[in-house]
Amino acid sequence: MKPLIILSCALFLFALTASAQTNKADMAVNRANNAVNSANASVNNASATATNAVGSVTNTANQVKDVANQVGSLFGKKHPANVTIIKVPGATLGKLKTIYAGLKDCGSVDASSLKLVCTDDDQSITVNHKGSTSDLLEQLEKKTQLVNDDNVRLSEGNITVKL
């Protein structure tokens, strides 16, 4: 009977020790899970911070561009909205200069941006202007007799004059 009591006590002590070791293992696993969760939260916060920073930089860039445009407009700097190429195939330099002079008189044209090209392959004038290409054509028809409804083809950004 004595061996049975000793065996029972030993079994009880073993079960108690095993239970304590299991609790320690569970606590270690819980600590590891908590550390992983904390790291995930930190990464999520860093990601949100980076996203907010990118948004802030974009907003700041847009604000700087708007301020630059406002300051430029205070000093008379104009920002033409459109570029149109006027092609006059086979035109002489004299006829191109006549159209060029008419363009300079148009109110919507940035006269400093006019670019005249008269080579064997290309006879054209590039112009920066406000408004649409058709508005520019209407103004040009009033300024020169070389350009009229009978000899013009029009598409946005291009005017072709056949002389």
Image (tube, helix red, strand yellow):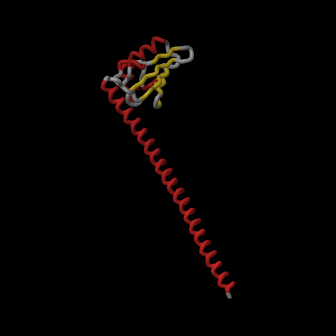
Instruction: Tell me the residue at 38%/30% (across/down).
Output: 131
> Is 91 situated above or below 31?
above
Extreme residue toward the bottom, this view: 1
Of 114 and 38, which appears nearest the observer?
38
> Is 12 situated above or below 60?
below
> Is 51 situated above or below 156?
below
> Is 60 situated above or below 4?
above
In the rendered view, does 67 fall on the left or right side of 5? left
Q: Position of residue 157 (x, y in %)?
A: 46, 29
Answer yes or no: is residue 144 visible: no
In the rendered view, does 3 fall on the left or right side of 110? right
Q: Position of residue 117 (x, y in %)?
A: 50, 16
Answer yes or no: is residue 86 visible: yes
Extreme residue toward the top, this view: 94
Of 137 and 2, which appears nearest the observer?
2
Of 43 and 138, which appears nearest the observer?
43
Instruction: Tell me the residue at 46%/15% (across/down).
Output: 96
Q: Quadrant of residue 5?
A: bottom right
Quarter of the image for the N terminus: give it. bottom right
Instruction: Tell me the residue at 49%/12% (across/down).
Output: 92
Mark count: 0
Extreme residue toward the front, this view: 2
Instruction: Tell me the residue at 48%/47% (across/down).
Output: 46
Of 11 and 123, which appears nearest the observer?
11
Q: Position of residue 88 (x, y in %)?
A: 49, 20
